[in-house]
Amino acid sequence: MKFRILPIAASLVFAARFLHAEPVPAPVAEAPKPAPAVEPAKPAEPKKTAELPPPKPLGNEVGKGLAWLAKAQNSDGGWGQGGGWRVNRQEGQGGRLEGDQIPDPSDIGNTAIALQAFLRAGTKLDSGEHSQVAAKAAAFLLTRLEADKEDSLYVTTVRDTQLQSKIGAYVDTFLAAQILSELKDRLPDPADEQRQVKLLDKVVAKIQEHQKDDGAFAGNNGWASTLSQGICSKAHNGAWAAGAKVDLAALEKDHNQNADGLDRASGVVASGAIADAGVEIYRYSAKLGGMTGFAMNNVTRRADLEKTVNAPTASAPEKAKAKDELAKGHSEKSLAKLPDPAAPGLPPSGRPDAS
């Protein structure tokens, strides 16, 4: 019996507002004495993954889904698409190939999505339920990505999958960058953590090398390729937050692509050159998700720039550059306007130094 994996990943963004009130001194009969200076509250340092509280218990249906994924995992640690048809491009005939005899090897895209489900459910790689499943999946991805020698935007030799034909030829690459960011500080072996850092930089460099001036990618064709473009946006912004070597100009291009077609007054996002299969929610989720990630990173970016401007040890050129960036962010004409850090819905990303 063939199984079928439906690759759906969901992300939740939580925000908090903090209200500060100035203390009002009570009236006194005599001349008031000066009140002791009150130190302003310092923002809490973002917690590392290991310091976060344990996740809430999952519902039975989620548990059943994870158990099914664990049972469907291949012996090499990866997942394939679970049977079904494949595109028949390699033989130059077009159409579909299907049947029990069609190979269904593990691939990077489906494995990344499956591992993401475990990680977001709170699975650890060194202890607890499904830890061996997650560890095997991470090992599969690290090994396969290290073996990639492609000059193209591909990171896999497994081609013409349903995932690629449906939402974009390079979806494996974008999912690889996304899952590598999520694996940061989760790998028990320090050597594997170093592998993760190098591979994330490698995949990000590949994405940036092939990114066009309009933020899209030539050849990323699919029935609804706007979905893989949206995954790329989240991966790119997630990589920056994880401390990878991300070019800010590449983030700008990606953001401009997401903002293209957005009517800021009405919130309507018009259909553009990237295929969306005529399904509005595909387009909206891809573009608005990317813009949210960009805005969250800009909170941290603004704090970094202001810190440089006020740093006694910063050089004059460094201060001038930081002031220019801040001015650009405050410009009403800039699509990449830096949001107010106190604005609701924009928690800090906690990006570490990428040196």
Image (tube, rainbow, N blue to C red):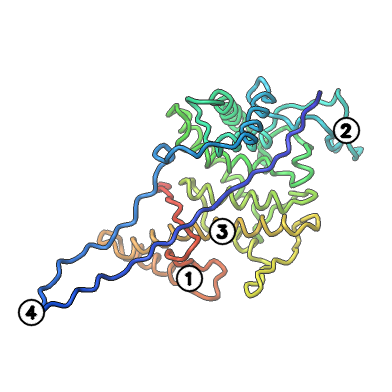
Residue that numbered label 3 is attached to: 292
State the CA–CA distance, disc 2 to disc 1: 52 Å
Which numbered disc, 2 or 1, marks the residue closer to the eye?
Answer: 2
**Marked residue nearer the N-terminal end (4 or 3):** 4
State the CA–CA distance, disc 4 to disc 3: 54 Å
From this viewpoint, which residue is outermost toward the front?
Answer: 29
- Label 2 sits on a secondary structure element that is strand
The x and y percentages for residue 168 are 74, 46
- Circle 2 crowding by C-alpha within 10 Å: few under 14, some 14–19, many from 20: some
Residue 157 in the figure: left or right of residue 332: right
Residue 30, numbered circle: 4
Residue 328, numbered circle: 1
**Marked residue nearer the N-terminal end (3 or 1):** 3
State the CA–CA distance, disc 4 to disc 1: 51 Å
- Circle 1 crowding by C-alpha within 10 Å: few under 14, some 14–19, many from 20: some
Q: What residue is rendered at 76% in x and 61% in y?
A: 273
**Marked residue nearer the N-terminal end (2 or 1):** 2
Which numbered disc, 2 or 3, marks the residue closer to the eye?
Answer: 3
The x and y percentages for residue 97 are 88, 33
Q: Amino acid at mark 2?
A: Leu
Which numbered disc, 4 or 3, marks the residue closer to the eye?
Answer: 4
